[in-house]
Image (spheres, rainbow, N blue to C red):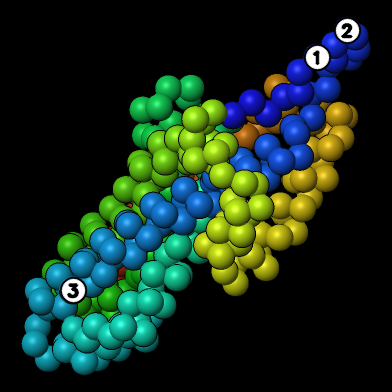
Amino acid sequence: MALLEEEAADGGRLDTRPRVLEFWRTLAAGVIGGGFVGLLTGGVLGRLVMRLLAVTSPKHVAGRLTDDIQPVGQISLGGTVNLFITTIALGAIAGLVYLWVRRVLPPSRRGRAGLFALFVGSIGGAFLVHDHPSFDYSVLQPEWLAVLSFVAIPTLFGLLAPGVVDRLESPDGWAGRVPAWLMIVVAAAALNIALVVVAVPVLVAFSLSRSEAALRFWRGHAVTVAGRVLFVLMVVWGLYGIATDVVSIATNMPSSAPFTP
C-alpha cells in the first residue's frame, strides 16, 4: 500500500506525508493481522500446549493453580474465551510493533519473517519463561517441554505475522478493499482494553506523520542506524533473559542475574 502522496499535477513540491486514511488502514492491518496470528499461536496452540503439559505432568499436579491462576487439567469456556481475548490483544500489539521495526528488517519476505521471529521469540520467550521456583517451569513436567513450548509460541508468531500483515496491507489485500471505518472498528475490538495502552503512542505517531520536518528526521539515516542497534540490543536482552531462566530451572535455584526481562 502506497504511503506517499503523488506529485502535484502542477509540478508543485512532493508531499511525502501519508494519506490520513492510509495511515489508519496500515495501523489497522498491523493490529488485525497480529491479532489473528496471536489467536492461532497463543490462543489455539497455547491451549493445546497447556493440555499437553497437563497430560505429561504427574497426576498429583491436577487441579493445582498455574502461574496464571488457572487449574491444571481443567478447561472451561470462560478460561478459553479469556485466553483468546488476551492473545488477540497481545498479538495486535505485536502487530503494531512489527510496523515499527519493519524498516530495519531485510526487504525479502523470508528475511523479515526470520528476523522478526528472532525478535519476538527472544523477547516474548524471556517474558513467558520464569525462573525457579515458578510453578509452570518447576512443577509441570517435563520442564524442557514447558520452556521449549513457550519460547516456540512467540517465535512462531514472529514467523507468521509479517506475511499476514503485509498481505492485508498490500494493494489487493483486505485492508484496501473494505471501508476504513470497518478496519478501525475491527482493530479497536481486537485491541480491546489494550487500546488504552496503545492510544497515546498511536496518536503521537499520527501527529508526527502530519509534519514534514518530523518525517524527514524519522526517515533519516541516523534513526535507521539507531533502530538497528536497538533491535539487536533487544534481541540480546531477550536471549540473556531466557538463558538465565533456563540455568535457574536446570539448577533449581532462583536467578540472581540483574536486568532480566
Q: Is residue 82 above or below residue 211?
A: below
Whole-Å distance between the Cαs marked 1 and 2? 7 Å
List x then y, in percent, for residue 172. Answer: 49, 30
Q: Quadrant of residue 162?
A: top left
Q: Which residue is mark 2?
A: 11
Residue 98 is left or right of residue 56, and the answer is right
Q: Identify the mark nearer the N-term, 3 or 1.
A: 1
Q: Which residue is mark 3?
A: 51
Q: Residue at x 86, y 29 (%)?
A: 212
Residue 62, located in which quarter of the rendered image? bottom left
Mark 3 vs mark 1, CA separation in Å: 57 Å
Q: Tell me if mark 2 has few (under 14), some (14-19) or many (20+) residues whose alpha carbon lies within 10 angstroms of its own.
A: few
Q: In the image, which disc is placed on residue 7? A: 1
As helix, strand or loop, the secondary structure at mark 3 comes to: helix
User: How many residues crowd around disc 3 within 10 Å: few (fewer than 14), some, or many (20 or more)?
Assistant: some
Three-letter code for the amino acid on which mark 1 is drawn: Glu
User: What's the mark number on residue 157?
Assistant: none
Q: Are marks 1 and 2 in contact (CB under 8 Å)?
A: yes
Q: Is residue 25 visible?
A: yes
Q: Is residue 194 above or below residue 13?
A: below
Q: Left or right: 258 with respect to 143?
A: right
Residue 222 position, x and y percent, is 72, 26
Q: Position of residue 66 (x, y in %)?
A: 31, 83
In the image, 71 versus 41, the foreground residue is: 41
Looking at the image, tell me whether mark 3 or mark 2 is earlier in sequence order: 2
